[in-house]
Image (cartoon, rainbow, N blue to C red):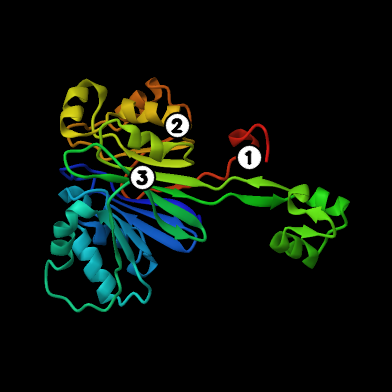
Amino acid sequence: MSPRELVVLGTASQVPTRHRNHNGYALRWDADTILFDPGEGTQRQMMLASVSAHQLTRICVTHFHGDHSLGLAGVIQRINLDRVPHPVHVHYPASGQQYYDRLRGATAYRETARLPTHPVTDDGPIAHEPGFTLSAHRLSHPVDSFGYRLVEPDGRRMLPDRLAAHGITGRDVGRLQRDGTLRGVRVEDVSERRPGQRFAFVMDTRLCDGVYALAEECDLLVIESTFLARDEALAHEYGHLTAGQAARAAAESRVRHLVLTHFSQRYDDPAAFAEEARAAGFEGDLTIAEDLSRVPVPPRRDAAVLDPQGP
């Protein structure tokens, strides 16, 4: 199992189908698992995908339409039933506080777990962990909606040939990494920048600045493509993207792997979304999401690709 991967739990938009459950996405990121937009039926999909309540460390809700949040009640109750011992942090638009409160208290159950809440009010960082910073950006939808972006800090990749040239071996390598210098040798002299990985989750929205802010230089972008181009007017009316719009935004933002999802039940041929995405100019890795599929986060890109001038 990849230590960093997207587990797709559901891919339907407003109406589920025989083959597509309502939304739900779990991002495994080392020791963290972040659950995004748990729609109706998410608890069962988690079981089928071997994602347990004990693995969850955060829940991120983009907005309070039912296909993105009705499963929250069941997931919260499962976290309590399983007596998850660590806090599970919950992020959601602050304007939807009444809906979160109703879902959390939808039925009677015994509360045993800690679920600290973090209502989102504006763009910017909302959580800092050693392995990543989580940020939110406002999107364009009939109700308040925020997308989420996870960025790993840049690190350093030690270069064995340079270490050997300076006679640095064994425990001295760790000392150099910790202190930054050793016997006049700087860590920059024997290493290169290791770009951090970047992930973004963009749900119901029209094209807007937030889409581009979230998608910029992402290794893996999960983005809604509810409609095809022939229904672009309908997409704009209801606050959604077409496959072509999502793919063009991804191409312009230099996304490496694009995952299209949140499909309207009106379409019965998933290949049409791939065709439209390619026609729009996206040339990177492309996944048309299917329920219970897994998508690994791509390996880190070479530092020179992001910064031709070097560290």
For the C terminus, the image quarter is top right
Disc 1 versus disc 3: distance between alpha carbons?
24 Å
Which residue type does callout 1 highlight? Answer: Ala
Where residue 209 appears, as percent x and y from the top left, is 34, 33
- Left or right relative to 10: residue 169: right
Q: Which mark is residue 303?
A: 1
Identify the mark nearer the N-term, 1 or 3: 3
Measure the alpha-carbon separation of dots 2 and 1. Answer: 17 Å
In which quarter of the view is residue 80 placed?
A: bottom left
Position in image of residue 147 (x %, y %): 32, 45
Visible residue check, residue 39: no
Task: Give the residue number, with chain letter if any, for mark 3.
Answer: 201
Graded by Cα atoms within 10 Å as few (under 14), some (14 to 19) or many (20 or more), the crowding at tag 2 reads: some
| Residue labelled with disc 2 | 253
**Contact, mark 3 vs mark 2 (Cβ under 8 Å):** no
User: Mark 2 or mark 1, which has the lower sequence index?
Assistant: 2
Q: Nearer the viewer, residue 180 or 43?
A: 180
Mark 3 is surrounded, within 10 Å at the Cα level, by few (under 14), some (14 to 19) or many (20 or more) other residues, namely many
Tell me which residue sits at (39%, 40%) in the image: 214
Q: Amino acid at mark 3?
A: Phe
Residue at left 29%, top 30%?
A: 207
